[in-house]
Amino acid sequence: MPRFFVAASNVLGGVAYIEGRDAEHLKVLRIRSGEVFTVCDGKGKDYICRLKSADASGAEAEILETVPSAGEPSIFCTVYAAFPKAEKAEAIIQKSVELGASRIVFFQSSRCVSRPDEASALKKCQRWQKISEEAAKQSGRGIIPVVLVNLSYAKAVAEASKAELPLFFYEGETDFTLKEALESRCGFGSVSVVTGPEGGFEASEVGFAREQGMLVTSMGKRILRCETAPVCALSALMFHTGNL
């Protein structure tokens, strides 16, 4: 069933008002009066709707049923990924959203090949947010995960450390496994997943993460690409918490 996101304020009196790109998408899909589709308010609530009317200014749909968004996991997970090269960021966003991440934050670290300045990072964020929205629609999410940029490694890690389960993945870690990290804490509701760039983390960066209280964790004996690591971590996390 086609899925569209609207602002919560666009749901009023049993009617969902669809505007902008989504209204144009209705036309592209050739959805006609009387046909049924899903509208989501971006806050975890789905509306099963029937199209009433559509014109150049937008569309109106009658709400038939209101249900919680089934695609939202029971945990709030933020993926912190060091800036990757080129299109790898887009792959990280798409797959992270599909797997249930609630936020994606790209940050700067010592070995990052890509080093955008503030203006460039803002421009990238605008494009990345659209990718998040499309992935959210495709995967049946109840929210559109926010994509952010933090140019400071120290600030990004300090923020990540505040999660109830703060995971920091490091290819040099051999003693503490992902399985042990997931089993080390019970009943957690928030998780942070921190992964590095193509060249990995500097030893000093790992030390700082430990000082901040991050759980420095191994992903096994194989070295994963920077775009693979968040997918691996999220898959294991969602499986462990019954969200996969």
Image: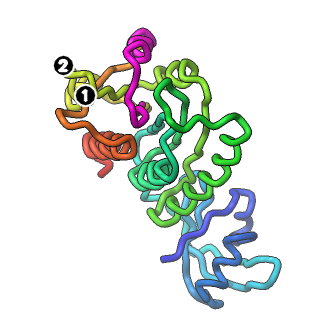
Task: Identify which amino acid the numbered label 1 is placed on.
Answer: Ser
Label placed on residue 218:
1
In the orientation shown, which residue stands out farthest toward the front? Answer: 113
Task: Please name the residue that numbered disc 2 is placed on.
Answer: 175
Q: Residue at x 45, y 25 (%)?
A: 163
- Check disc 1 and report its element: helix, strand or loop: loop
Choose top left, top right, bottom left or bottom right for residue 176: top left
Position of 44 compared to 59: left or right?
Answer: left
Position of 159 compared to 219: left or right?
Answer: right
- Above or below for 194 versus 17: above
Q: Pointers 1 and 2 in contact (CB under 8 A)?
A: yes
Choose top left, top right, bottom left or bottom right for residue 222: top left
The residues tagged by marks 1 and 2 sit, at their Cα atoms, a distance apart of 7 Å
- Check disc 2 and report its element: helix, strand or loop: loop
Check if residue 204 falls in the magenta segment.
yes
In the orientation shown, which residue stands out farthest toward the right? Answer: 57
Residue nearer the viewer, 131 or 1: 131
Q: Which residues are magenta?
A: 193-212
Task: Identify which amino acid the numbered label 2 is placed on.
Answer: Asp
